[in-house]
Amino acid sequence: MTEKKYKSYTLRNYKKIKQLTKVSEDDIKSIEVVGNVLPFKANNYVIEELIDWDNYRDDPIYHLTFPQREMLSSEHYKIVEEALDNNVSEEKLFSICNDIREQLNPHPAGQQCLNVPMFDGEQMSGVQHKYRETVLFFPTSGQTCHAYCTFCFRWPQFVGDKSMKFASKESRDLAKYLQNHHEVTDLLFTGGDPMTMNFKVFRKYLDPIWKVIDKTNIQTIRIGTKSLSFWPYRFVTADDAQDMLDLFKMIVDKGINLAIMAHFNHPVELSTDIVKEAIRNILATGAQIRTQSPIFKHINDDPEVWAELWRKQVNLNCIPYYMFMARDTGAKEYFELPIVKAYDIFREAYSKVSGICRTVRGPSMSCTPGKIMISGIAELNGEKVLALRFIQGRNPDWVATPFFAKYDEEASWMSDLKPAFSEKFFFEDEMEQIYHQKYSDCEENKFE
Ligand SMILES: *Cc1c(COP(=O)(O)O)cnc(C)c1O
Ligand code: SF4
């Protein structure tokens, strides 16, 4: 496989992308204006091998990586456009853009205060422990990606404002925490993208945990990554590709399940020779690849696309895992689909594939009480309702219990839904308690 040297493009140097000559002046202007508020980053693989520039306006990967005008409200767009036209100072521009960012719900679903565990009487930075079995770890060095998705719900991690960031410089406290918390079976490295770290840096984060692994109850290590889609060379021709693959093998040989949680949003990301080779290399270590993606307008709001995505993944021996609803942050209005529409697409796609592809679950909303899945549209007692269930709950007892919301064609998130047949959802009182007793100073919306 021929090597490619990674080259990234951001707002600073994107004019060097020669394919942009195919893009209209208006669309370039949108990149400039929106790109000042929402971070963007593309790379030479995405540009050269994934985007069809002759049809860029309809191209899913173009929408996935480049800012579009409608990602900001017309009001916000105008404010930034004027600031740029007037050549305001950099500080002024930063503060204007930061004001706008603050209005885009940068930390959805209790990420910053509700999920952070305590250790030695202090909040652990860069660690989230929301669901009993699984701890999330955000290594500081993994808080970037090979390219940025325009729908990223972690976008504040990529903006130069420290107060918006969430990460940990090292993992020694986490190693101790895991020894004291044997209810935790799964450790999930996340970001950003932990696979942007080189082998040595990744190893540095793993080592303290690896040293005590027998004193923990870790049975699965997951690595959330978009690298297979944005930079598959990571696992083929990169200088440390073999070292990383050997490390995967070391984890598997220990009898620990290693799950690479790969983000694929569209079948085109699975079409190149290099991604196929990267997948083969990872699977050869004994690791599994499980796949996940949100459902979005402009990128994959089509049952054919999803059926093909799952089918291709299975053909490459990957396991479809989650379909998510777009998070209520950043450019959500540009991407979001009503719940009912997302469910229809899911159902139609799901009905087209064999049982082997139906390991996928969704559409699921990651909200403050848990991961809530839309399991169907039904009529009960003459009332049309949405049937819901928790895939994961802040209280594990909530999981897998069916509950119902009033049918609503407009609703696009849990917070838009009203309970059917009762005043409150069954978990609301308990959620209220968790919220008030433990986290009275948490400003985040409890049902978002
Ligand atoms: C999705 C998620 C997990 C993992 O849940 P699984 O059902 O085990 O895949 C863990 N923590 C948080 C905060 C999550 O959003
Ligand atoms: S891969 Fe995930 S963290 Fe990285 S830019 Fe995309 S959505 Fe954000």
Image (cartoon, rainbow, N blue to C red):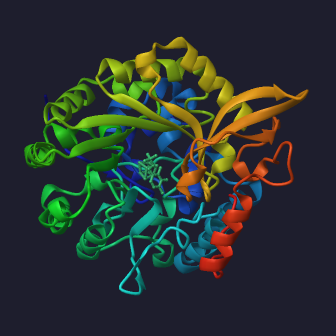
Asked whether 214 or 110 is in front, the reply is 214
Q: Left or right of 399: which side holds 78?
A: right
Asked whether 311 or 375 is in front, the reply is 375
Vertical relation: 208 (above or below) 354 = below
Which residue is rendered at x = 68% and y = 71% of the image?
433
Place residue 97 in its image quadrant: bottom right
Q: Position of residue 380 (x, y in %)?
A: 84, 29
Residue extending furthest toward the front:
397
Total residue callouts: 0
Which residue is rendered at x = 50% and y = 40% of the image?
64
Asked whether 231 or 129 is in front, the reply is 129
Vertical relation: 218 (above or below) 160 = above
Which residue is rendered at x = 14% and y = 55% of the image?
199
Q: Left or right of 257: which side holds 167?
A: right
Q: Left or right of 245: which side holds 302?
A: right
Q: Quadrant of the N terminus?
A: top left
Place residue 57 in its image quadrant: top right
Which residue is rendered at x = 18% and y = 56% of the image?
198
- Residue 79 at least partly seen: no
Q: Quadrant of the C terminus?
A: bottom right
Q: Left or right of 143: which side holds 258?
A: left
Residue extending furthest toward the bottom:
121
Q: Position of residue 155 (x, y in %)?
A: 50, 59
Q: Position of residue 186 (x, y in %)?
A: 33, 53
Vertical relation: 406 (above or below) 165 = above
Q: Position of residue 90 (x, y in %)?
A: 52, 76
- Residue 404 at least partly seen: yes
